[in-house]
């Protein structure tokens, strides 16, 4: 598998292409602005259309859950969305926190930030802001947010421990997160692990479920709980691009599972701003 910088470049390129197409294009195929690929990036997506604050221009069908469903948002909250894309979860969160709240989306892809800002301007929202930056080094001051949300993004981050340390840092003491993401139970075949397109497609960058939860706990979060879990079935026609028939059959017969989970965690009310072992803020 590529190194961290190469992986980030792959993700930026793929999601830069996706930013230029519609949700319908994403659901029909994964063909972007510069040609076709083999991964359906909308494969994990949940239906947002009935949610207050939903805006179709911001929905590219890229999530794997609805983190706002369990985020316990309330009017006046400051919310940070990690990997905010075109703004879908930000606008749903804004409908809950209202005019007295604040929603801040962070994404490393310039095309996504541009699309999200255009959407916010069209909607006339002045309390929704989008900043370009990386989750491992958030462009946000410490102790800023009441709630952090994220939707199918942290599996794309090479250093997940640092990503959760940054989540801890930007949360106020007593704040919490609700994050939807992709995890594994069992080992993926080597052909899938080494596929860079499947990394960008939220499969090969996923780590073991128990390791994921342990990283969160070791970062300093308390009351860590899986709020929702669902199995993801990657279609055979996608897997055949990376596995031969024997490998595909072995994978299907194994106990390996790909899951979308929504996870909750609290930052202790008496905590310092930094995660354990992260150093001084």
Image (cartoon, rainbow, N blue to C red):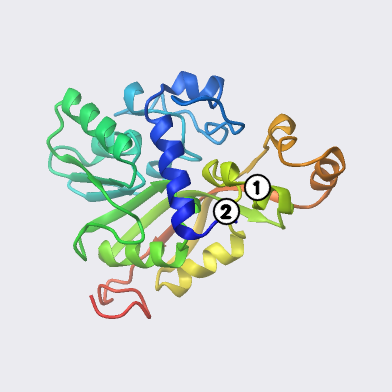
* Residue 166 to residue 111: above or below: below
Instruction: Using the numbered discs, state the Cα–Cα distance from disc 2 to disc 1 in whole angstroms.
Output: 9 Å
Q: Left or right: 54 with respect to 23?
A: left
Within 10 angstroms of label 2, few (less than 14), some, or many (20 or more) residues? Answer: many
The residue shown at (78%, 52%) is 255
Q: Left or right: 280 with respect to 198?
A: left
* Residue 24 to residue 104: above or below: above
Q: Left or right: 190 with respect to 171?
A: right
Q: Are marks 2 and 1 in contact (CB under 8 Å)?
A: yes
Name the front one of labels 2 and 1. 2
State the SS at label 2.
loop
The residue shown at (32%, 72%) is 268
> Which quadrant would the N terminus be assigned to in this image?
bottom right
Query: How many discs mark residues in the rendered view?
Result: 2
Q: Left or right: 122 with respect to 223?
A: left
The residue labelled by disc 2 is 206
Residue 240 is at least partly visible in this image: yes
Residue placed furthest toward the right: 246
State the SS at label 1.
strand
Residue 104 position in % (x across, y down)? 23, 46
Residue 215 position in % (x across, y down)? 49, 69
The residue labelled by disc 1 is 258
* Residue 39 to residue 185: above or below: above
Residue 31 position in % (x across, y down)? 52, 24
> Which quadrant would the C terminus be assigned to in this image?
bottom left
The residue shown at (46%, 62%) is 160
Dot placed on the residue nearer the N-terminal end, 2 or 1: 2
Q: Quadrant of residue 90?
A: top left
Residue 256 position in % (x across, y down)? 74, 52
Q: What number is the disc on residue 163? A: none
């Amino acid at each position: 598998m590529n190194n961290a910088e190469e992986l980030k470049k792959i993700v930026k390129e793929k999601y830069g292409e996706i930013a230029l197409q519609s949700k319908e294009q994403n659901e029909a195929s994964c063909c972007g602005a510069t040609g076709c690929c083999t991964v359906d990036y909308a494969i994990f997506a949940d239906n947002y259309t009935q949610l207050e604050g939903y805006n179709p221009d911001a929905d590219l069908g890229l999530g794997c859950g609805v983190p706002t469903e369990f985020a316990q948002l309330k009017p006046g909250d400051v919310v940070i969305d990690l990997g905010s894309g075109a703004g879908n979860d930000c606008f749903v969160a804004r409908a809950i926190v209202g005019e007295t709240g604040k929603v801040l989306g962070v994404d490393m892809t310039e095309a996504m930030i541009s699309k999200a800002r255009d959407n916010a301007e069209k909607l006339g929202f002045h309390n929704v802001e989008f900043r370009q930056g990386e989750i491992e080094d958030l462009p946000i001051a410490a102790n800023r947010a009441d709630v952090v949300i994220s939707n199918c993004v942290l599996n794309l981050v090479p250093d997940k421990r640092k990503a959760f340390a940054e989540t801890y840092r930007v949360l106020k003491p007593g704040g919490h997160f609700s994050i939807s993401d992709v995890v594994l139970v069992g080992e993926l075949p080597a052909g899938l692990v080494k596929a860079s397109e499947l990394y960008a497609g939220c499969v090969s960058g996923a780590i073991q479920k128990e390791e994921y939860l342990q990283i969160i706990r070791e970062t300093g979060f308390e009351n860590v709980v899986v709020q929702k879990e669902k199995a993801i079935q990657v279609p055979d026609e996608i897997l055949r691009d990376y596995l031969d028939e024997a490998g595909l059959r072995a994978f299907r017969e194994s106990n390996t599972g790909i899951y979308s989970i929504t996870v909750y965690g609290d930052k202790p009310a008496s905590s310092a701003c930094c995660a354990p072992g992260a150093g001084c803020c």
